[in-house]
Image (spheres, rainbow, N blue to C red):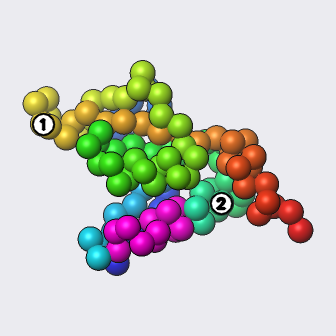
């Protein structure tokens, strides 16, 4: 079906070092909530078990499905932080990337109902 997980990017960019959340699902799994559900669980793990302060995600601007997942997760996008991915060559149509961020505090606020016992 695919994967959802956390990763430490190793290329050079202004926002690195960081922890990235990413996903890749087979087309059959698109539009069924799998990426969002698994990403929510992954964020909870990152913010609680790993005690991360922030988690980022990035993709190409035209990847509307992934951007929609990022937005459903409560991640914020600042166009001033968009970047050219240094692993891709100049002129590659996929070189430009959008960056989304989510802080632990914002995640806690949005998920306060999950933390009540």
- Dividing the picture into quadrants, the one containing residue 12 is top left
Q: Is residue 42 left or right of residue 77?
A: right
Which residue lies at the image location 29% right of the left edge and 76% below the top edge? 28
Position of the C terminus, as image quadrant, is bottom right
Q: Is residue 15 left or right of residue 84?
A: right
Residue 103 coordinates in the image, percent (x, y): 64, 41
Q: Which residue is mark 2?
A: 44
Q: Residue furthest front?
A: 31
Please name whichever residue, 111 or 58, is drawn nearer the observer in this view of the structure. Answer: 111
Disc with the residue nearer the chain's start (1 vs 2): 2
Q: Is residue 36 left or right of residue 82?
A: right
Q: CA distance from mark 1 to mark 2?
A: 35 Å
Disc 2 packing (10 Å; few <14; some 14–19; many ≥20): some
Residue 67 within the magenta-colored segment of the rendering: no
Residue 39 coordinates in the image, percent (x, y): 52, 62
Residue 77 coordinates in the image, percent (x, y): 48, 34
Q: Say how many tags the image has.
A: 2
Q: Is residue 10 left or right of residue 41?
A: left
Disc 1 packing (10 Å; few <14; some 14–19; many ≥20): few
- Say above or below: 32 vs 56: below
Residue 31 within the magenta-colored segment of the rendering: yes
Q: Which residue is mark 1?
A: 92
Which residue lies at the image location 10% right of the left edge and 30% below the top edge? 91
Q: Which mark is residue 47?
A: none
Position of the N terminus, as image quadrant, is bottom left
State which region is magenta. 29-39
Asked if residue 44 can be seen in this view, the reply is: yes
Residue 43 coordinates in the image, percent (x, y): 60, 57
Q: Main secondary structure of the magenta part?
A: helix
């Amino acid at each position: 079906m695919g994967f959802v997980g956390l990763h430490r990017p190793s290329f050079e960019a202004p926002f690195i070092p960081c922890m990235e959340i990413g996903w890749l699902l087979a087309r059959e799994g698109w539009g069924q909530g799998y990426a969002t559900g698994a990403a929510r669980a992954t964020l909870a793990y990152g913010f609680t078990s790993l005690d991360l302060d922030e988690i980022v995600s990035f993709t190409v601007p035209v990847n509307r499905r992934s951007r929609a997942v990022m937005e459903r997760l409560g991640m914020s996008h600042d166009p001033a932080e968009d970047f050219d991915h240094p692993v891709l060559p100049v002129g590659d149509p996929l070189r430009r990337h959008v960056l989304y961020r989510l802080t632990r505090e914002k995640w806690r606020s949005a998920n306060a109902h999950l933390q009540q016992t």
